[in-house]
Image (spheres, rainbow, N blue to C red):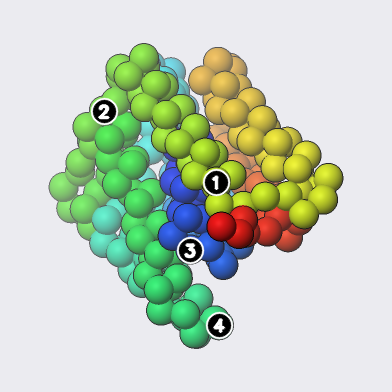
Amino acid sequence: MFIGHYGVGLASKKAGKNISLGTLFMAAQWLDLLWPIFLVLNIEHVTIHPGDTKMTPLNFDYYPFSHSLLFVIIWSVLFGFVYYFLRKNLKNSIILALLVLSHWVLDLFVHRPDLALYPGGPFEGLGLWNYPVIEIILEFLIYIAGIILYINVTKPKDKIGKYSFRGLIILLALFHVMNLTGPPPPNEKMIGYASLSLWLIVLWAYWTDRHRELKTK
């Protein structure tokens, strides 16, 4: 899952109105922001295996520190704790912790059984990546719902707030289509380096949110 995670981040603006979209995106994608760092450092591993599922050629053969349920719970608590330490807002801290956890829940639906409950433990996954039509429809519905909820809560302060948001939404959709239709990556290490670009999306979201404001009733 890709844009589905961003859809959940967008939708969460309704609950956490004074949380920046950049922070919401960071929480929703925290596991996938850590994962390429662990790949580059050779802590976790992925192999390219075309046909592993119908929608991805990647075999996620070792990623317990970024994607096992036990570590996801730890990351969720840590993320929420750090936000509370910095901002002293318990409600928003809980929202962000749940956002981190939501990533694993959404991945559970699409991955084949390769998500460990804990390092060395049993694996789970419902395998929607082997049912492309259902998965694509579900993911786009989550994304569109998130966009609608976000624009129902915020409005642009200026042209940057208007067009940077549109650009961000289009770019994410294009990235998703490229992931679905593009050729397999050339090698495993390149996956890690290319995936580090996800941090740029977080920065773009911070920039966009600074140029938007909450709607008044």
The outermost residue toward the front is: 217
Can residue 83 be seen in the rendering of this structure? yes
User: Which quarter of the figure has residue 99?
Assistant: bottom left
Can residue 6 be seen in the rendering of this structure? no
Q: Residue at x 51, y 20 (%)?
A: 180
The residues tagged by marks 4 and 1 sit, at their Cα atoms, a distance apart of 28 Å
| Residues at marks 3 and 4 touching, judged by CB atoms closer than 8 Å | no
Q: Amino acid at mark 2?
A: Gly
Q: Is residue 58 above or below residue 184?
A: below
Camera-side residue of 164 and 131: 164
Q: Amino acid at mark 3?
A: Gly
The residues tagged by marks 3 and 2 sit, at their Cα atoms, a distance apart of 31 Å
The nearer-to-camera label among 3 and 4 is 3
Q: Residue at x 57, y 37 (%)?
A: 191
Mark before the other along the chain sequence, 3 or 1: 3
What residue did someone put label 2 on?
127
Secondary-structure class at tag 2? loop
What residue did someone put label 1 on?
152
Q: Pointer 1: residues within 10 angstroms few (<14), some, or many (20+)?
A: some
The nearer-to-camera label among 2 and 1 is 1
What residue did someone put label 3 on?
16
Q: Pointer 2: residues within 10 angstroms few (<14), some, or many (20+)?
A: some
Q: Position of residue 128 (x, y in %)?
A: 29, 25
Camera-side residue of 70 and 22: 22
